[in-house]
Amino acid sequence: MSKKYYFIGIKGTGMGPLAQILHDQGNEVVGSDISQFTYTQAPLEKAGITILPFDAKNIEKYQDYTFVRGNAFEDDQVEVKAALDAGVKMITFPEAVAEQIAQATTIAVAGAHGKTSTTSMLAHVMKNVARTSYLIGDGTGHGVENSEFFVLEADEYRRHFKPYHPDYAILTNIDFDHPDYYKNLEDVFSAFEDFAKGVKKGIVAWGDDPSLQKLSVDVPLYYYGDVSGRDDFLIQDVDKETNGSTFSVSFRGQDLGRFFIPIFGQHNIFNATAVIAVAYLEGLDLDGVREHLKTYPGVKRRFSERKVGAATIIDDYAHHPTEIKATLDAARQEHPDKEIVAVFQPHTFTRVIAYKDEFAKALSKADTVYLTPIFGSAREASGTVSAEDIAKEIPGGATIISEDNLSPLLAHDDAVFVFMGAGDIEKYEFAFEKLLGQIQPDRS
């Protein structure tokens, strides 16, 4: 039986895909948000989902709907306040997700880094081998009626994943991130362990993470990695080429065969092995998994690549030192003979304070480094640190650039430019592409 839902903040990176899933499953879906265009609204509009501007009057008009409240909104937000005053049925985003995952065998992917890429890869494989709905943190969602499986990206920020009780969980790593909320690594670990204790069938965790090694849970815990004698799903015979990576996987001595992924970096080999592990544990056809890993196209804002004239431009969401290192490692694998130029926009002042030295160390993996001013957030519009503080710690230094003056980048001919950040780094990319177009009008 179909239901009616109203999403407050429907353009959110989690809210949008959930709205798509409910719409795909035959429910009536409406939502509201800011009028400014965001990349998440295109699939909603394509699906024919109505998006309204925020207005308290919307609550009265749709009062017989179930209201889904976005995580970003406090009680004083105009529609949230109106809904609370009116006494209509309103649930949080995690509660709405929890309702969905109770209806299928659910695989949730959590981790400080790599969760979006792993969830996207898992969804790509699963949808091709079984009836699968999925919700990914890049704004992608798809619903299938009577799904056998539900693939979910589970966000640890503010412990949003706590209400989820999936059948399986993939845990990619635990790291001290979101210093505006978590106190320290131990605080992050406690959130992950609380989540892990709610998993029903089994957990697949990255073996190289010391925090994940400390988990205490009541379900089977399987580790994946490349350390013989410790990892249950063992990676061996890795062959990294400029078109991707080939590797073998075994489970406790049983050979599961060789696999190929058309993407780069050791972290993606780990991600793929986690996908293989869950498929094996659920008894899915590994030949099908093998075939569909070959066709995995990647994920939005995760190592997205394009050519502009002689320049190769890579766009990536990396905003933590661990992610920066992985992204530069992937760029080096694909382009071993080219200059790697990192263009990084630091994201939030608290993260820079916590990781200034680590940022410098990770960025030093590039041949040349450029930094933009720090991108703040709604919670921290200013701070006591600057991009210059990172630049001082990088061996050989780094150049601070602005959107209005990107000409220093033109000094690098036939280079690979890796733009990284979680803020609005895209505006620097677009400005650079425009600059390249002015000097290379015949670019392909």
Image (cartoon, rainbow, N blue to C red):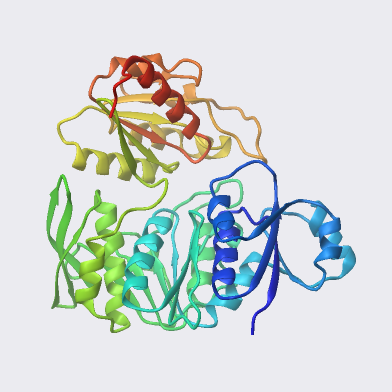
Q: Nearer the viewer, residue 105 or 4?
A: 4
> Does 330 appear above or below 414?
below
Task: Give the percent coordinates (x, y) of residue 145.
Answer: 50, 80
Please give the name of the residue rendered at 19% of the width and 75% of the height, measured from the top-left corner: 287
Please give the name of the residue rendered at 38% of the width and 31% of the height, measured from the top-left corner: 360
Task: Give the percent coordinates (x, y) of residue 428.
Answer: 46, 27
> Can the viewer see residue 392 in this picture?
no
Whether residue 103 sits left or right of residue 274 in the image: it is: right
Task: Give the percent coordinates (x, y) of residue 424.
Answer: 52, 35
> Does 47 appear above or below 252?
above
Quadrant in the rendering for residue 24: bottom right
Please give the name of the residue rendered at 30% of the width and 15% of the height, measured from the top-left corner: 411
The quarter in which the C terminus is drawn is top left
Quadrant in the rendering for residue 226: bottom left
Whether residue 403 sits left or right of residue 87 in the image: it is: left
The quarter in which the N terminus is drawn is bottom right
> Can the viewer see residue 20 in this picture?
yes
Whether residue 97 sits left or right of residue 111 in the image: it is: right
Quadrant in the rendering for residue 98: bottom right
Whether residue 5 sits left or right of residue 351 in the image: it is: right
Q: Nearer the viewer, residue 300 or 440?
A: 440
